Image (tube, rainbow, N blue to C red):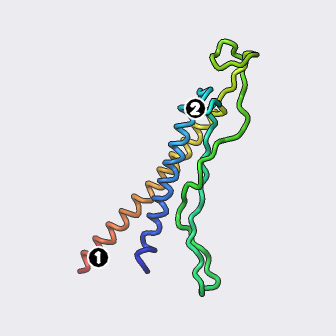
Amino acid sequence: MSMQHIFAGSQISASGLSAERTRMEVAANNIANANTTRGTDGEPYRRQRVSFMAMMNQLQPGRPGTLPQLNGVRVAGIEPDMSDLPVVYDPGHPQADEQGYVRLSNVKIPHEMVDLMTASRAYEANLKSLQTFRELAEQALSLLRGIT
């Protein structure tokens, strides 16, 4: 068994940590901009969404019947949520149009909090996996020291 196979689990967990950290950062940014009615482009802030992509090992030529193996996850992209922007009547708002309507951000705080909580739980699970791998590696090394 090669060293690459031994450390594959920790590499997968590390990629999950990185991806979930990005998801938490995007959710926090969405929450921070929830009340932004005009950005640098003149439009209200649009919620950002993170999409993940599984990283797979390529099939090895000459080995028919082998399946690609999971090699972790990565952030495939961060795209704006193009759902409708809510409109409210607030004639005193500085961004109100001629009829007194203001277009608001499409960020929904409860939705972002759920995203933040699930990303946090996934981050914790990946961290626990890395900690378990470390403990097992330490135990294996201590056993090997005892044999020699």
Q: Position of residue 77 (x, y in %)?
A: 59, 52
Q: Nearer the viewer, residue 29 or 147?
A: 29
Query: What type is the residue that disc 2 sits on?
Result: Thr
| Left or right of residue 141, residue 14 in this image | right
Badge 2 crowding class, 10 Å Cα cut-off, few under 14, some 14 to 19, many 20 or more, is few
Q: In this figure, which residue is indicated by the disc labeled 2?
A: 40
Q: Secondary structure at mark 2?
A: loop
Residue 142's place in the image compared with 77, above or below, is below
Q: Nearer the viewer, residue 132 or 37?
A: 37
In space, the residues marked 2 and 1 are separated at their CA atoms by: 60 Å
Residue ID at (56%, 72%): 57
Residue 138's place in the image compared with 21, above or below, is below
Quadrant location of residue 128? Answer: bottom left
Q: Secondary structure at mark 1?
A: helix
**Picture quarter with the C terminus:** bottom left
Residue lying furthest bottom in this view?
Answer: 62
Q: In this figure, which residue is indicated by the disc labeled 1?
A: 144
Q: Position of residue 62 (x, y in %)?
A: 60, 87
